[in-house]
Image (cartoon, helix red, strand yellow):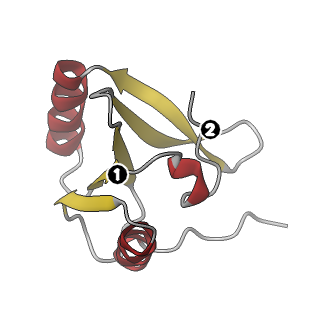
Amino acid sequence: MSAPAELPASLVVPALVRRVFASGGVATVLAKGHEGGSAMLLVHRTARGDSRAYERVPDVAGGMVWRLAAEGEAAVDRFCARARAFDPDLWIVELAVPDPARFVAGFPAAG
């Protein structure tokens, strides 16, 4: 049996933004990608000023997992710029909400 197809980010991102706003948090689409693409990068900014970028990558079981890609504001900004230059179809969403794992399936728990 094959793995289920990823939903397009053009459906996932607006739903994520609505859920975050409904909880009192802030979600900002930093870059819109291809309507049918599923590539996403999430930037989590905490109230303490910490910044982390997470990307979805394939795991050994054939699914997708979120992994920490960059930490610190300058490193996150550089990573996002490089990732977007490499893949202009990439969606980048910034989350300013405690514990983003509440909103994103498989997202690492806040540490």
Residue at 47 percent across and 28 percent down: it is 68
Of residue 9 and residue 109, the one placed in the foreground of this image is 109
For residue 60, the mark is: none
Where 30 falls versus 55 (above or below)? below
> In the image, residue 44 lies at what x, y percent?
36, 41
Estimate the x, y position of residue 81 in percent, counting from the top left: 14, 36
The residue carrying mark 2 is 109
Examine the rendered structure and indicate whether residue 37 appears above or below residue 15: above
Q: Are marks 1 and 2 in contact (CB under 8 Å)?
A: no
Query: Which residue is nearer to you in this view: 3 or 101?
Result: 101
Residue topped by disc 1: 95
How far across and how far down the image is residue 111, in percent? 57, 27
- Quadrant in which the N terminus appears: bottom right
Where is residue 38 drawn, in percent x and y? 42, 64
Horizontal side of residue 85 vs 21, given as left or right: left
Q: Residue at x 30, y 60 (%)?
A: 27
